[in-house]
Image: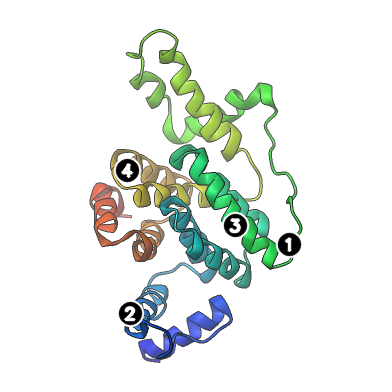
Amino acid sequence: MDRIEKTDVKVKELFNMPAAGDEGTDPEFMHILQRYIFGEVCYTGSLDNRMRELITITALATLQTLPQLRSHVAACLNVGCTPVEIREVIYQCAPFIGFPKTLNAISAMNDAFKTAGIELPLPAQGTAADGERYERGLEIQRPIYGDEIKERYTWLPGDFAEAVPRWLTELGFGDFSTRTGLDGKTRELLTVIILAALGGAEVQLRSHVAGALKTGSTGEEIVCALAHAGCYMGIPRLFNALNAARDLLEEK
């Protein structure tokens, strides 16, 4: 198949509709967009439709491109992602993009769920009781990242030297990473995408690329995920991410 034929196949798989034709106000742009994303990038690398769509909604939630997020939540459902998986992907953005933007993404996600006839709220997935968030979070954090953050911020004044690292453990790991519905390998890989899409977080991105490798992703899978996300976050952020983690990825 040439890339035009591949585009039509992929768009039908994801959206249950044909690729863009000559209708509308900007058919040329839609041809460029669809043939690049769905006719080339989606056919390069090892990741399947399901994982690519989880990567896509991660990038779109981070970038706050909510109309496209609604469309791709529907595409996630079309390729076999469960509502719980989709929700977990959106929820885990919160420590990185903040609660207000995550609430925006949740609203767009729920709009797509309602359109698909999915009953809300979805089943609860939390497993860490309120009094055990720190210990449960540390069980996940320490094998991957050690005590680096705690040691790095001892210079903070007063209570903050203890509170800031603890908040990271309790929120990022205790509240989110302990939840069921999404495995640890997928969570780490998608965290890399959040940080790449944010831009300016290359130090943290590098740490999480190392974390993704430790939790089972291959270098090729990480590069494939970043390249796919590049369709949505733009090529400069793709190159920044690849350059930040080059030494971790080039021999994996």
Tell me the CA gap for discs 1 and 3. 11 Å
Mark 2, secondary structure of its residue: helix
The residue carrying mark 1 is: 118
Q: Are marks 2 and 3 in contact (CB under 8 Å)?
A: no
Give the distance between the C-alpha atoms of the residues marked 1 and 4, in whole angstroms: 37 Å
Q: Cα distance, mark 2 to mark 3?
A: 26 Å
- Between disc 4 and disc 3, whose residue precedes? 3
Instruction: Mark yes or no: residue 57 visible.
Output: yes
Q: As shown in the figure, which amino acid type bears the numbered disc 4?
A: Arg
Q: Position of residue 149 (x, y in %)?
A: 39, 25
Mark 3 element type: helix
The part of the image, by quadrant, that contains residue 221 is: bottom left
- The residue singled out by tag 2 in the image is 29
Q: What residue type is labelled 1?
A: Ile
- Residue at the outermost top position: 158
Badge 3 amino acid: Met
Name the quarter where the N terminus is drawn.
bottom left
Which residue does the numbered mark 4 point to in the structure image? 206
Q: Name the residue under label 3.
A: 109
**Foreground tag (1 vs 4):** 1
The residue depicted at 42 percent of the width and 42 percent of the height is 211
Q: Is residue 212 above or below residue 8?
A: above
Horizontal side of residue 60 vs 89, given as left or right? left
Q: Distance between the residues labelled 4 and 3?
A: 29 Å
Q: In which quarter of the image is the C terminus?
A: bottom left
Taking the spot 50% from the left edge, 21% from the top edge, the residue there is 166
Q: Marks 2/1: CA distance?
A: 33 Å
